Image (cartoon, rainbow, N blue to C red):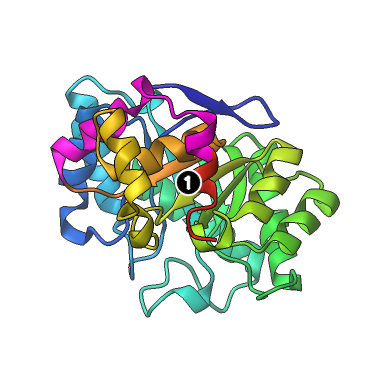
Amino acid sequence: MQNITAHNGVAVPNFMYGTAWKQEDTSRYVQLAVQAGFRAIDTANQLIHYHEAQVGEALLTLAEQGVPRDQLFLQTKFTPVSGQDHRTPYDPKAPIAEQVAQSFESSLEHLHTDYIDSFILHGPYGRWELEEEDWQVWGALEKLYQAGRVKMIGVSNVQAIQLQLLCELANVKPMIVQNRCYAALGWDRAVRDICRAHHVVYQGFSLLTVNQGVLLDPEVGAIATRIQTGPAQVIFRFAQQVGMLPLTGTTNAQRMKENLDIDRMDLSRDEITRIETVAE
């Protein structure tokens, strides 16, 4: 598996396994993914959509099977109160910085580790601008990074203007962005352009689920036939070739292997251009 390197020199495996919506089966699927070859795992300290503690259970089992913690890239998130239910993993009445600290310590406990490779804000408090709460969270993330407790910090579900502000005004600019990626919006081109300019790793999620029409496009099907794979793998390889780090949440062991096999494939410049504009 190849790597993508951010502006701070930290390398990230170029394909990530996402653990959202797997609940009590999370541990089993994480083990399957790592056994298939994934070395980057994404989770969040948010019980509505993730079961972070089950990721930790998988890590213990994998270590016993010969895959130690230091061979894996672990990413988790601080989720604000608005994204939590009654099982908030921190005191919702505490100051924002303390909420971040409590969530982080909880994640370390869940994941049975003493450091996190990537710790990101699950989504800004503001819709278009950055609110005071966002800067408080970012300050807390910067402290964790400067203390060496996390290797990378970043933000998810971010608008281009918000990311630009972070890159220009933060003491430590983000190393990672994770966004839902719509073909109809140019595959999040505005945000990706900012990431490229600042050497921020762009992670694209929901590449398949929100782009079903692209998977059915005859030209995408023709590309799949040429390189002897499926439309889903074409989209994942396209993502990698335009500089994205794709996420997959498949629960099918064979699909996991097929997804990782895309390193052997290359799309032509014309094919990439076609996919870039397929939904425009």
| Residue 36 image offset from top left, x and y in percent | 21, 29
Quadrant in which the N terminus appears: top left
Q: Is residue 127 above or below residue 38?
A: below
Q: Is residue 114 visible?
A: no
Magenta span main SS = helix
**Which of 278 and 122 lies nearest the eye of the viewer?**
278
Residue at left offset 48%, top offset 46%: 275
Q: Is residue 253 magenta?
A: yes
**Which of 144 and 84 lies nearest the eye of the viewer?**
84
Which class describes the residues within 10 Å of circle 1: few (<14), some (14-19), or many (20+)? many
Quadrant in which the C terminus appears: bottom right
Q: Residue furthest right?
A: 169
**Which of 116 and 131 lies nearest the eye of the viewer?**
131
Q: Amino acid at mark 1?
A: Ile
Is 200 on the left or on the right of 112, as rendered? right
Q: Quadrant of residue 23?
A: bottom left
Q: Which residue is mark 1?
A: 275
Residue at left offset 85%, top offset 53%: 169
Q: Quadrant of residue 46?
A: bottom left
Judged from the image, the secondary structure of the residue bearing numbered disc 1 is helix
Is 256 on the left or on the right of 267, as rendered? left
Q: Is residue 174 above or below residue 226?
A: below
| Residue 95 image offset from top left, x and y in percent | 65, 71
| Residue 255 image offset from top left, x and y in percent | 20, 39
Residue at left offset 32%, top offset 60%: 50
Q: Is residue 222 above or below residue 39?
A: below
Q: Is residue 218 magenta?
A: no
Q: Is residue 194 visible?
A: yes
Magenta segment: 252-272
